[in-house]
Amino acid sequence: MPTRNILSELSRYKIGTFAKNKKILLPALLSIFLVFSLLLPASVAGDATTVHLPDDHAIAHPAVNSPSLASEMAMDTLQGQATPMVAAGFYHTVGLKADGTVVAVGDNYWGQCDVGNCWEQCNVGNWTDIIQVAASAYHTVGLKADGTVIAVGDNSDGKCDVGNWTDIVLVAAGWDHTVGLKTDGTVISVGGDLNLQLEVGGWTNIMQVAPGFGHTVGLKADGTVVALGGSAFGQSDVGDWTDIVQVAAGNYNTVGLRANGTVVAVGDNGYGQCDVDNWTDIIRVAAGWDYTVGLKADGTLVASGDNIYGQCDIDGWTDVIQVTTGGWHTVGIKANGTVAAIGYNYYGQCDVGNWMDITKVTAGSYHTVGLKDDSTVVATGYNYSGQCNVEGWAGINQTAAGYSHTVGLKHDGTVVAVGDNYYGQCNIGNWTGITQVTAGFYHTVGLKTDGTVIAVGDNRHGQCDVSGWTDDIIQVAAGGYNTVGLKADGTTVAIGENYYWQDDLSDWTDIIQVATGYSHVVGRKADRTVVALGGNSFGQRNVGGWMDIIQVAAGSYHTVGIKADGTLVAVGLNDYGQCNVSGWTDITQVAAGETHTVGLKADGTVVAAGLEIELAKWNLGVVNYNLTISSTPGGSVTTPGEGMFTYNAGVVVRLVAEPKAGYRLVNWTGDVDTIFDVNAATTIVTMHGDYAITANFAVNWLLIGGIIAAVVVAAGLAIFFVRRRRATLTKRQGRRRAARKKH
């Protein structure tokens, strides 16, 4: 009899009728209860919350009530193994290599790149045995394999005073403070405490920390979050967050990654940096200055917030296994150990690889201009002021590039200009009879056919006061805030800022070319030697030993020379790799900008050195681990399969165990410390070593017992209704016999 008919039949009778048959009904009701108590657990066994990942792998994040970032780092500490990673400060980027050494590129004013192997001028730190790095605005922090910590950079608030730290498993760097997570789940911090962001002494059971601009966030083992410090925008209002597996802190906002791959955010949302509600399948989050980035399980990225420097233009990135955000730039490490970056100081000024038929190159502060053999012009790099808008130019025979403007000299002696014109540096529309142009930071200078000079633009230091220069000038050069003229007799004149005595050129003789940087002047002599005057903070004037030089170029703080054999020499500031030109050959002309160097080759192609090129050269190495998977009789592991598999360190592997009919998964055993849920049929394992795991299956007695109980119940109910039917018929027959006797 169908179940619904049984229930319908039962509903027809009153409780009193059931009472008369309680010897049958009570066992039946107990059997029904037994069915539900057995079948329900059996039906939900192994139905645990999982993180949905692709069938192969993706970068890991810690799970609630499972190994966390802290424990993962602790394991790496015990193993002494560095997992390649990147960290981004405001103006610098740090890379941890697989061998535990560190590389860095970018602004080094405070020494935040003094980590050894930086660039030539930074080789003072020689960091080794590092297993994690963190970077903030002006300092860099490294966690060593023995649990101690080192730091370099700005220490005005004491944020680098970490020399006595021990038993640390994770470090994090905020704007003006540094936070360390200890092996026992407590937290230590140093640095600025204006907003009481250092008051973390009472925190316990912490699994990850994230410091922001003036606040500190901690993730607890139970998936809840604590925060203290500044909260003017509500960035510390995280008390109701649950099921969080990772946190990130921006300047005035806080971001949390949930176990299900969705994201929550609180705090300042002026640029939409908290608009993350619709993000899914996220496995890691990073918070920059007014923007947020999420790494998806498939290795792609999403971003929201301020994009003024293109820091959110990451749509085409693939194969990313870790992402970090600086002030206004985004850096990702790919599965093959290479690095990609975009945003501030990544203007594309070195994107000249496809240029052809170039006859001359010039370099602005953050843009590059190329003159083609057909007298047209190409430009690449920072274009905020339109300084790269040269597509319509024709009939050009020379170009010059300033801080944010570009100048072109036409065949007819007239001049065109585009870009920033705040100081009038582009007001050259009436110039005629010009034979050469040059551009300083914010001023433009032209040499006329009669040997006199004209200038427009910023004149705060008198750099445009060239009207008195006589008729024997043969070349002009414009620096940051000064102007230099080369005379026909090999002497020079200069005007403008002279703070570093860069204009004291009166004793120079036999000069055949001049070049100017921000605060230094370089002269090439007839005998192919080089002289220099002015600022030398970064060694940009150290050209005394140069010989056989056929051209010189001066960047803001570096100097480059072409040798007669087509190779280059360079000295000065190398924070962005702008001096890494030693391997160049067949160079016929060179130009130097603020942070990059461009070279024209004999075949008309162009090469460049700078941040983009240096980051593209980085390969932080790959650490691989083996995962061996097996199963007991009664089922199999279908994803990724059974046998031995090799994965990058730190990735997550999705595990799916499928039992045969009548069996169930009992648990996973073996090296299970980083398995998300050892009792779930679908789960994940984080690769931090060579692991061997087994899926254990057993007969599903719960299901079998439930089936038997269901049969017993059905049989009992059938007997009950048969007996009840017979009793009813007997009563009816008795009433009929009694009725016949009366009649």
Image (tube, rainbow, N blue to C red):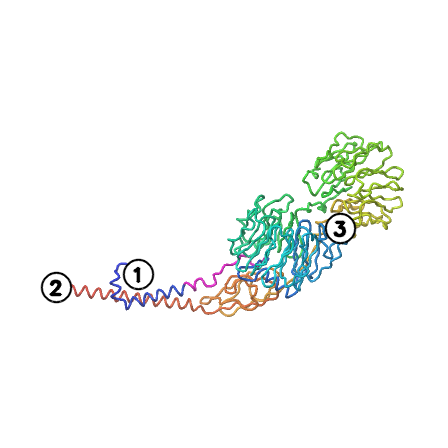
Q: Amino acid at mark 1?
A: Ile
What whole-number distance in Å separates the C-alpha atoms at marks 1 and 2? 34 Å
Residue beneath label 3, please?
A: 574
Direction top: furthest residue: 430
Residue 452 visible (yes or no): yes
Categorize mark 3 by other alpha carbons within 10 Å: few (<14), some (14-19), many (20+): many
Say whether disc 3 or disc 2 marks the residue closer to the N-terminus.
3
- Position of residue 75 in the picture relative to residue 679 (left or right): right
Question: At label 3, which amino acid type do we have?
Answer: Asn
Question: Which quadrant does the N terminus fall into?
Answer: bottom left
User: Mark 2 — residue?
Assistant: 740
How far across and down, in percent of the image, does residue 654 sit?
55, 60
Note whether residue 300 is visible. no
Helix, strand or loop at mark 1 = helix
Q: Which mark is residue 322?
A: none
Mark 2 element type: helix
- Residue at coordinates 58% horizontally, 61% vertically from top-left? 185
Quadrant position of residue 359 = top right
Q: State which quarter of the image contains the C terminus.
A: bottom left
The segment highlighted magenta reads: 40-58
Query: In the image, is 332 to the left or to the right of 364?
Result: left
Please give the residue where the numbered disc 1 appears in the rendered image: 6
Q: Secondary structure at mark 3?
A: loop
